[in-house]
Image (tube, grey):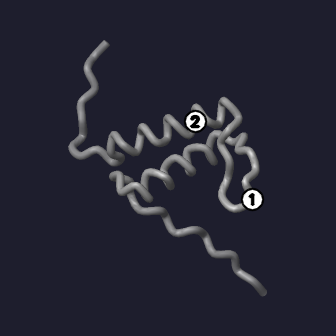
Amino acid sequence: MAARKSSGKRKYGRAASKRVESAMRRRKKGTLKSGRSGRTVKSRKQAIAIGLSEARKKGAKVPRKRGGRKSRSR
């Protein structure tokens, strides 16, 4: 296999990937809980989001959150 060519800077730091990895393992084990409600997380996407959020709090290199879409009310 050909070696992957790096395109400059890494978007996410290594510490961030470790946090996400840890969150994924906890999800698989069934011990990953979501924020205030404390419900068990089953979604893969939610596990990644929790891992990145933890990494941000610890000061790891993680890009800023994208702005959420605002719902228009009539």
Q: Mark 2 points at which residue?
A: 24
| Residue that lies at the very extreme toward the top in this rendered image | 1
- The quarter of the displayed image where residue 27 is located: top right
Q: Which amino acid does label 2 sit on?
A: Met
Q: Quadrant of the C terminus?
A: bottom right
Q: Quadrant of the N terminus?
A: top left
- Label 2 vs 1, first from the N-terminus: 2
Asked if disc 2 and disc 1 are in contact, CB closer than 8 Å, the reply is: no
Residue 35 in the image, given as x and y percentages of width and height: 66, 58
| Residue that lies at the very extreme toward the bottom in this rendered image | 74
Residue 33 in the image, given as x and y percentages of width and height: 68, 48
Residue 38 lies, with reference to residue 29, above or below; the image says: below
Q: Which mark is residue 68?
A: none
Residue 9 in the image, given as x and y percentages of width and height: 24, 46
Q: What residue type is labelled 1?
A: Ser
Residue 17 lies, with reference to residue 65, above or below; the image says: above
Counting the numbered discs, the total is 2
At horizontal 43% and vertical 51% (from top left) the residue drawn is 55
Q: Which of 69 and 62 is in front in this view?
A: 62
Q: Nearer the viewer, residue 40 or 49?
A: 40
Residue 64 lies, with reference to residue 4, above or below; the image says: below
At horizontal 72% and vertical 40% (from top left) the residue drawn is 42
Is 68 situated left or right of 14 in this image? right
Q: Which is in the foreground here, disc 2 or disc 1?
A: 1
At horizontal 26% and vertical 20% (from top left) the residue drawn is 3
Is 61 situated left or right of 71 in this image? left
Q: Residues within 10 Å of mark 1 (few under 14, many from 20)?
A: few
Between marks 2 and 1, how big is the CA–CA gap? 19 Å
Q: Is mark 1 on a helix, strand or loop?
A: loop
Q: Name the residue under label 1.
A: 37
Is 47 situated left or right of 1 in this image? right
Q: How crowded is mark 2: few (under 14 residues within 10 Å), some or many (20 or more)?
A: many
